[in-house]
Amino acid sequence: MRGRATLILGACLTAIFAAAALVSLVWTPYPVDGVAIGARMKPPGTAGFLLGTDHLGRDMLSMLMIGARTSIAVAIVAVGIGIAAGVPLGLLAAARRGSLLDEVIMRANDLVFAFPSLVIAILITAVFGPSAVNAILAIGIFNIPVFARVTRGAALSLWTLDWIRAAQVAGKGPARISAEHILPNILNLLIVQGTIQFSLGILAEAALSYVGLGAQPPTPSWGRMLSDAQTMIALAPHLALLPGLAIVLTVLGLNLMGDGLRDLLDPRLRRAR
């Protein structure tokens, strides 16, 4: 019961921001590239501006909606990169456990883990310049060893089971066993890990944008909004509170959803309940 309530609450919070991101594709209350100096730093509730305006007179609600689109898009693509590259590597390492190939894959993962996504982003932007695409690459590269390790660890525990050995006796090769038997049985774990990495991806995108390595102006980003607001927090605290609250609620929703999915999909937790 607790797991379902957690899942529902997390899904509702996530759905709110996902809906805002989708709506921003076709409509926002005001254009975010419009500057109204006469309406600078209006507080929330001001006539015509539900959540107020920023230091350039731009509508905060419109900025938050497009910021949601930016953060979610970056996180989705970055997690997709991690899954697309990390899961096959993890399956390959598990299938060739103890071999030189397994050792090479895992040591390469350790090498990537030695550099946080922020450091990877700095290296990439030093060569190609700051942009949302480079932020996606940095976060995606960091996600690859995460999914590779999770996949390998879960797959190794299955390779020792009798029904996997029966599949080997039946003449199935490692690639076919991995695709037909291993992957479907660890899919629930990968789904839960994906929600966790999705929330971390939003945090990473906000951090990269905050230091100027993510989405560049005029594209709104929650991290960029926080960076712009830090010198005006005493005059207009809503400039920092609103994007900060958006980040907190989105990450909280994803973490609650991941926790609820784990409780729902893990058979051991179901038996414990």
Image (cartoon, grey):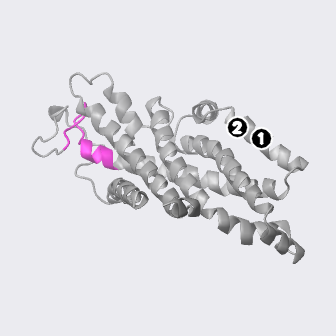
Task: Tell me, for residue 138, which label it has, or none.
Answer: none
Cα–Cα span, label 1 and label 2: 6 Å
- The circle drawn on residue 108 is 1
Indicate the position of residue 73 as horizontal and vertical percent values.
47, 52
Residue at the spot 47% in from the left edge and 40% down from the top edge: 203
Q: In the image, residue 83 lies at what x, y percent?
A: 63, 55
In which quadrant will I find the N terminus?
bottom left
Above or below residue 251? Residue 6 is below
Q: Nearer the viewer, residue 97 or 244?
A: 97
Q: Is residue 87 left or right of residue 262?
A: right
The kind of residue tagged 1 is Ala
Helix, strand or loop at mark 1: helix
What label does residue 112 carry, if any?
2
Which residue does the image show at 70% across and 37% down from the upper left? Answer: 112
Q: Residue furthest bottom?
A: 170
Instruction: Give the percent coordinates (x, y) of residue 27.
Output: 28, 58
Q: Which residues are magenta?
A: 51-65
CB contact under 8 Å: marks 1 and 2: yes
Q: In the structure shown, which secondary structural element does the residue marked by tag 2 occupy?
A: helix
Q: Residues within 10 Å of mark 2 (few under 14, many from 20)?
A: some
Q: Residue at x 37, y 58 (%)?
A: 5
Identify the main secondary structure in magenta.
Answer: loop
> Is residue 255 in view from this perspective?
yes
Of residues 230 and 192, which is closer to you in this image?
A: 192
Query: Measured from the top left, where is residue 140 in percent x and y?
Result: 61, 46
